[in-house]
Image: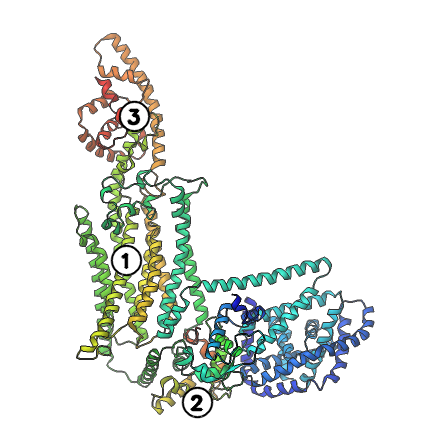
Amino acid sequence: MGNKQTIFTDEQLDAYQDCTFFTRKEILRLHGRYHEMAPHIVPMDYTNEPDVKIPIQLITNMPELKENPFKEQIVKTFSEDGAGNLSFNDFVDMFSVLSEMAPRELKAIYAFKIYDFNTDNFICKSDLEKTLNKLTREELAPEEVTLVCEKVIEEADLDGDGKLNYPDFENMIGKAPDFLSTFHIRI
Amino acid sequence: MVNTNKTKKNNREDLEKIGIQIDADETTDTAEEEDDDNEEEDIKQPAKIRKKQNNRKSSKPSDEDEDNSDEDTKLKARNNRRRLPVQNGIRKNKNDKDDESDEEKSTDTAKNSRTKARNKDNGKGEESDDNSELEGENKKTRKNPVHNNNRNNRNNANKRQKDEDNKKVKQANSRGNRKGEKDNGKDKKKKGKSSSSSSSSSDSEDTLSEGELAKVLEEVEEKKMLIAAIRTKAWRMKRKLTTLKESQEFVEKFEGALGKGKGRKFYAYKVMMMKKWIKFKRDFENFKTSCIPWEMKIKEIESHFGSSVASYFIFLRWLYGINLVLFSLTFGLVVIPEVLMGLPYGSIPRKTVPRKEQPTAMDFSVLWEFGGYIKYSALFYGYYNNERMIGVFKYRLPLSYFMVGVGSFGYSLMVVIRTMARNARENGIDGDDGDFNFSWKMFTSWDYLIGNPETADNKFASITTSFKESIVDEEESQKDENIHLRRFLIVLANFLIFCCLAGSGYLIFYVVKKSQTYSTLEELTWYQKNEIDIVMALLGMFVPPLFETIAGLENYHPRIALKWQLWRMFALFLGNLYTFLLALIDQVNAQLAEEESIKNKTLAMVNSFNFTNSTSESIPAIDPADFPRGPCWETGVGLEFTKLTVSDILVTYGSILVGDFLRALFVRFINYCWCWDLEYGFPSYTEFDISGNVLGLIFNQGMIWMGTFYSPGLIGINILRLLTSMYFQCWAVMCCNVPQSRVFKASGSNNFYMSLLLLILFLSLLPVIYTIMTFTPSFDCGPFSLAIYYLNATSKTYETANLELKRKMQMLRDEQKNRRNNKYTVNPMLQDLEDLLPNNANVNKPESNQIVIGKQPNEATRANGKHGKEMTLAPPPPRMVVTKPPNPRQVSHIPGQPRSGTPGSGPRRPSPGQSRH
């Protein structure tokens, strides 16, 4: 324990526990993971909140994210600068949202951001196509892709503007039986 | 928690309402913030005015009003000092906010627009005093100590959510939406300004008016709520941290200010205790999560196989938790007290291995089948004594036995239902399944847990196929194929499956009936002994694949097919289980009949001792091992369940070893020298059969629930089983299974499993209740045996009967005396009797003595049995019995137990005989 105290002060740990869905131990473990990705950049001592960021390439190489077709998008969504460089705060934030304890609403907000590739606040056709191609590794024929995208919009678009805004998305995802269990990374 | 939930919901609603305007408001929002500093000067004036108005409205005496101007100037100075650092903070925040993506903004703007609404009302409130409620809110907002617009707004929003039911506020909201932008900017700043001033006023003044106090209190509560809910906010971590810090500081500062004099001290104490309590709760939470076992193991499996396989292990862990509680209940309240405080082994018949079984009682083959010493141990019902209170603590064991039985059912029921409710809440309503078919596939089909390349490949493939399937379905939904053929196939498949079910049910029934005929045989082969278990295990192993093959005829959608398959397997297992139960009930009935006779025999024997001995404490005079005893059907039932559970465990593990491990070895190593590719060709590796495994687990649990009342040790066995299977199956899965090619979702079926479990719980409750209600408990074993009470009662009636007898004898003697006076031909026996009488009242009638003389010991025993049966047909026997049966039995029974080399009975026996000579 004495060893662990040097990474964070008690106040910091408490604050992190208040702001995330993690326990003290998990936060320390997260720091361990964060540290081991780039040991030369990330200091062990976080008591004075150093301004350190890890580039996207390292983050997406984590085993938890490596196979995920949306890994870049996830990391970008959670990075403060939008380019995918994660500070420790962003890192904790990401796994907190993706943790088991996070409520559906919170997860839905971030899921919307992740699937909104061009960050225009709507999931439009191009976003859907990108999502689908990533999901199927571009094994569907173009006609099939357009058909599926049209179907999705037809199903979920409530206000008929041809794209999904957040309420549409939230309404759709709120009823999905698998959303909570699949939008979840255990760390 | 309820509150935070509510807030969350409201938040969401608001978001939905205003979500469309988001983009429009965005720009102005940031613009306002930037203007903030420039406009400070303009704001001061209105703030002052408002402050004055505030004070006028509050219940303070008017003389304070005059101080206000002085005070205000002071405050302003203070504000300026105060504001600096905070504003810096804002600037920093602003930067953050600028890159924040739009959802966050949307939340903020949602709140902004609500604030606007309020601001408009502020204007009104200044003119009209009757709008007191809103005014109150205004004042509240002015209290904000930190000059942070966003923060302010957020707090307002919280407040608004709290008062959501307030209609006026709602109206205001709608009005506010129509309101222009310029005013808002100003109003907000006014508030920001005035808030800081009044906050410091509350700081400086020691005495606060009650209204203000209430407001501060309310605000503190708000902050607390914010702190509690901050983790669910979709903000950047940095912002969360700063907000958290500010809120905490605020709470810290103002919590102490609440309450006066003595109250304050108490309040401070309360606050301190609250803090400690929160800290404790958090530590406890941390401790609790660190106690959850196998987290990493499951994570590993999750990343290899996706969430569906892991869901099995999570289910297994969950069941393990429940069983652990049940285990501690039964062992803590029943088994251990009995072992520690109850009579030791060998003290009474029920706690002793019968003489006949003693030579083999330690043999492994016997112990393996839970015979011998295990059968007569605390693991089974029969061992428990029916003494009402045991030990120095006067522990009421029978009561606790019963209560634990009821309690474990109640606990299981509660936990299952609570889990179901939670699952249902988390999963939302998945009613309209077809509505979002493609959308769900698009957004929820990727399992974020997958971290293994092979699984990922499978997942990609399965997603692609599922999309293709859906497309084909969509295209072909209009045109219908040969519907008659399809219907015919479905009917055929169902018919075949029904035949299978009926066949398996009959097979089990047949086997059980057959095994009952074995019980007459002396020597049983191993197969004969275990026939039922073997047949059931084989059925469980081979019929489900058969079902799957047959279900291929139906050509259902995989998910529907899976549900059908599960239901059919459920029916199969259930049918088997209930056939087994029926057979078991037959067996119990037979044992009950047998018991009746033995009971009478024992009763008679005990009674005989009562007679031979004037004190009734001669029961333990016989060695407990020799005491005749009933079959104790409860132990029998417990034994059957235990055996079934163990054979189930063995079959499961065996099939994993052979079916998974050996197959994997074969495929892996023979592949080098085989003509086709074994790994991708025919045998391949096995997939993990989630549904089958979950069903197995559910039925196992059902058996535990059923059996645990009659065999408290069963739950311990189950704990071991779950523990070992956790490790064993984890190993087997990681080492010899391949990820499923057709990955299906487990989460949706989570509650499906739970409902199966609930059903099983009820179904296992039924037979237990039935047996408890209909069958009388065994008379000589278990905590509910009535033997001793019954015997005590009878011995009492016998005593009274004896008194009566004495009187009769007296009369008889008188008569005889009279007769002796007349004739001198006296029966010598009668004379002996007379001699005996004063000492021992047991010898009663001349006829009975004659019977005794005439009979050899062996015959006597046999006769006894018959007698006994007649006797029990009339349960309240003493009165009629008095005249005849007791006596012959007394003499005859003891010879019937030749090995009973007890000192007590030996010398006593000859006494009547000696007197005869």
> The residue marked by circle 2 belongs to what chain?
A
Label 3 vs label 1, nearer the camera: 3
The disc placed on residue B577 is 1
> Which of the image's four quarters has the C terminus of chain B?
top left
Amino acid type indicated by mark 3:
Thr
The disc placed on residue B376 is none
Q: Which residue is tagged 2?
A: A125
Regarding residue A157, the answer to whether it shows in the image is no
Amino acid type indicated by mark 2:
Lys
Question: Where B474 falls versus B372 (above or below)?
Answer: below
Label 3 vs label 2, nearer the camera: 3
Q: Nearer the viewer, residue B742 or B187?
A: B742
Secondary structure of residue under mark 2 = helix
Q: CA distance from mark 3 to mark 2?
A: 101 Å
Q: Which residue is tagged 3?
A: B612
Considering every residue shown, the one lying at the far bottom of the view is A142
- Asked whether, in this view, residue B422 is left or right of residue B251, the answer is left
At horizontal 35% and vertical 54% (from top left) the residue drawn is B716
Q: Quick one: label 3, few (<14), some, or many (20+) residues within 10 Å?
A: many
Picture coordinates of residue B225, whole percent (x, y)? 59, 69
Amino acid type indicated by mark 1:
Leu
Q: CA distance from mark 1 to mark 2?
A: 55 Å
Picture coordinates of residue B768, whole percent (x, y)? 34, 52
Secondary structure of residue under mark 3 = helix
Where residue B203 sits, quadrant-wise, is: bottom right
> The residue marked by circle 1 belongs to what chain?
B
> The residue marked by circle 3 belongs to what chain?
B
